[in-house]
Amino acid sequence: MTMNKKYLVGVFDSEHTLIDAFEKALEKGVVVEEVYTPYPIHEILHGMKNKTHITYAAFFYGLGAVILLLSGMYYAAVIDWPLHFGGKPFNTFPSFIVVTIVATILTITLLTLFTFSVRAKIYPGKKAEIIDIRATDDKFIILLDQESMNVGKPEITELFQSYGASEVYEKETEKTA
Amino acid sequence: MYKTDVRGKLIDGEEKSLSQISAEILAPIYAKTPRWWYITMGIALLMFAWGIQSVYITLTQGIGAWGQNSTVAWGWEIINFVWWIGIGHAGTAFSIFLLILRQKWRTAINRAAEAMTVVAVLCAALFPLLHMGRPWLFFWIFPYPNTRGPLWVNFNSPLFWDFVAISAYLLISASFWYFGMVPDFATIRDTTKSKIKKAIYGFFSFGWTGSSKEWLRFEGLAFVLGGIAAVLVVSVHSIVSTDFAVSVEPGWHTTLFPPYFVVGAIFSGFAMVLTLVTLMKKLYNMEDFITGRHVDAVCRVLVFISLIMGTAYITEIFIAWYSGSEYEFYTFFKNRITGDYAFQFWAMFTLNALLPQLFWSKRIRNSIWVVFVISLLINLGMWYERFNIVVTSLSKNYLPASWAAYHPTSVEIGFFVGTLGMFTAGVLLFFRYIPQIAISEVKMVAKFNKQQTTHLKPGHHHDYE
């Protein structure tokens, strides 16, 4: 579902001014819709209160892969087609470890990439929803949703400018809801 | 934590704004293709064409077109396979180990190292594929329920381990490289004036905008991939070494092999990285980003690894004598240090263990062309090392009646030259169409340039990654 929404956009020239303004805005209880930056900034990632569980997901992918791989090799070597190697045991477990490690790493990588793609919505053919085109180059952008803005527009504009925003403007855009 | 006063500035020249960083790194993509690029590309494609012809002969006539015989059953193909895989270790070694060690200077070099890895591993994979004899049936090596029994693959065989390791390594290093580039592709999409570039790079940027939600997950992804790929770097080349070490050939059957191979791989990979970055520095004027201190740091790493290599060579020789095994003794003392293959042995020893010791001298580390030449010679030395391991052990083993010599045929030489062409062409395409340096990562560390060792503001921890 798409609809047009009104936004207030604060443009900053540097990381420090952005962080200061962002933290001050949070203190005042302003709801920040999103922050766009040319590189990851931990204060922002922390302040936005989003959490990622991708590392937990990766752990469970790995756990699943280990179980599947070891049981698969056990099935092939012991149950389905046991081979006699001069009286050696069918279940040659220690030498299964090598394939288990490498194939587990491969499984974790592919599934975690897929998870990232789904959760961060980064996939081939996606059209970027660009708020301010300079955010991937040298500007730091704070985006506020005007509907859910609990502090007045002039007040926020003044706050942003007092912390060194180079521009504050309004923008109406279509955003996937 | 990175201390600026210890290592010097990360970026040279006058202080750059963030948009300047984008513009300078992207300059080769926006500029006209230089003439040397076309000339080198032409030569690379000619080499590649020779490779294609050799592969054609191999496919139509079979492995008989190569110089192997029943004694020396592994020749140039395995040498070249191990050589390329070794070179391919640098990308992950650079990105992952330096990421884990929080070395911020890696940001200028990791992209090139990863690009090189992907192309080198592709080159490497061709050799065992064709060595199978009937490469069109290569999928038989996948363990899948089949109509041949079902007959399973041998899970105890290092050759199968190797297959798993190489496929995994290729897929993982390619995805690690690609996802690192997504934010940079978005930068190209948003800064280019060309509509075609906007469309193409826009497609490859997968809709990246730089929002906090994306960065958060991106960092999570990098953390996961970095953590597990570190294990991979060590395991892949250890597995390659078990192809040899699990056999009972004199000179192969040693417990030293896995660490020896891993270190050797990182050694050749770092040398190739050095070759590439000196070229980037000179041909593309990336001197502000790839500073003398970057080259210096890689050279220091090489001195250290070179010492490990020398230790490994001497350990092998010592144990060949100390073990009391006459076959081991013969292989090392009569067939490597002296004998038919003495030249290859001493070329290896000189180029890998002795020559890099020149890097102790600051003057040598600072003269870029000497560094360039030494980096090429190290890779030549590493090729001789693989020649030593593969050919000398096989040619004269337990039974003198089956001793044989090995000479490569022109088909084998063509195949190798073809992969060299493929690698060069791949690197040239990388130089031309992909940001050579990770833009967003350089921007992230750019601030460490200014305020020397002090934190930007009390209470703020800018310890990213």
Image: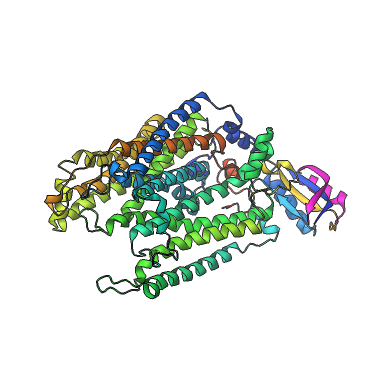
Task: State left or right for residue B312 relative to residue B171.
Answer: left
Residue at image x 68%, y 61%?
A: A50
Instruction: Decide which of B223, B103 is in the foreground and name it.
Output: B223
| Left or right of residue A36: residue A87 | left
Magenta residue span? A150-177
On the picture, is A109 further left or further right than A172? left
Above or below — where is B439 with respect to B237?
A: above
Quarter of the picture holding the N terminus of chain A? bottom right
User: Where's residue A74, x and y in %?
Assistant: 40, 72
**Residue A156 covered by magenta stretch:** yes
The residue nearer to you, when weighing A22 against A98, is: A98
Residue B451 in sight? no
B193 over A73 or under it: above or below: above
Q: Residue at x 54, y 66 (%)?
A: A61
* In this view, B56 is above or below A82: above
The answer to whether residue B182 shows anywhere in this view is yes
* Residue B250 in picture, x, y percent from top left: 20, 54
